[in-house]
Amino acid sequence: MSYRILIIALLLFVTHAHAEQPDRFGFGRTPSADEIRLWDIDIMPDGRQLPPGRGTAEQGQAIYTAKCSSCHGAEGQGGTNDRLVGAFKPVINFATDLQAVRTIGNYWPYTTTLYDYIYRAMPHTTPGTLSPDEVYALVAYLLYRNDVIDQNTEMNADSLPQVIMPARLLFYWSDEVEK
């Protein structure tokens, strides 16, 4: 019997609370088209929306040392934050091997995702402050350290999406699901 009273009281409370909510809360506004364009910076796996710029592993090493090594270790081997460098081993099963470390070389499926993440979120203390050239250089350095590209390969909006990551076959793009 007490459960029935509790349920009735709860239903009355929820109905009453919902009935008194205003249509608008009096804050915020609809963003302008220009504001939406500024936030619409996601990079697709095929490279759509990559900005102009370029960088090499040599340039990236200096940037990495200055802006990344304090968290990710001297050469991406890990520090207070994730390890970034590790060779691809097709026998790693991340679902069952809880000791396996996900690195750029053995887990990331697309180079463009790496660019997008670094551009938006790094460095951790000042995200979004790296220029496109700095990000291309960092990506080139990290791909080189993971034995994905040659040290002299320049990364830019044309070359970056052409790099095939070792783990790409472990993933599928949702628009490309086989029938």
Image (cartoon, rainbow, N blue to C red):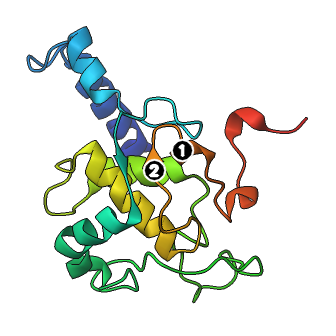
Q: Which residue is outermost to the left?
A: 26
- Relative vertical location of residue 36 with respect to residue 88 in this rendering, above or below: above
Q: Residue at x 18, y 15 (%)?
A: 22
The Cα atoms of the two marked residues, 1 and 2, are separated by: 6 Å
The quarter of the rendered structure image containing the C terminus is: top right
Instruction: Report the disc number at residue 102.
Output: none
> Relative to 169, is 103 on the left or the right?
left
Could you say where residue 40 lies in the image, as x and y percent from the top left? 35, 27
For label 2, the SS is strand
Instruction: Report the disc number at residue 159.
Output: 1
Residue sitting nearer the eye, 34 or 144: 144
Q: Residue at x 22, y 61 (%)?
A: 123
Q: Which residue is outermost to the right?
A: 179
Identify the amino acid type marked 2.
Met
Neighbour tally class for label 2: few under 14, some 14-19, many 20 plus, Cα within 10 Å: many
Q: Check disc 2 and report the residue beneath it.
A: 155
Pointer 1 and pointer 2: residues touching (CB < 8 Å)? yes
Report whether residue 120 is seen: no
Could you say where residue 159 lies in the image, as x and y percent from the top left? 54, 44
Can you tell which quarter of the image residue 17 is in? top left
For label 1, the SS is loop
> Relative to 67, is 27 on the left or the right?
left
Identify the amino acid type marked 1.
Ser
Q: Residue at x 70, y 55 (%)?
A: 171
Neighbour tally class for label 1: few under 14, some 14-19, many 20 plus, Cα within 10 Å: few
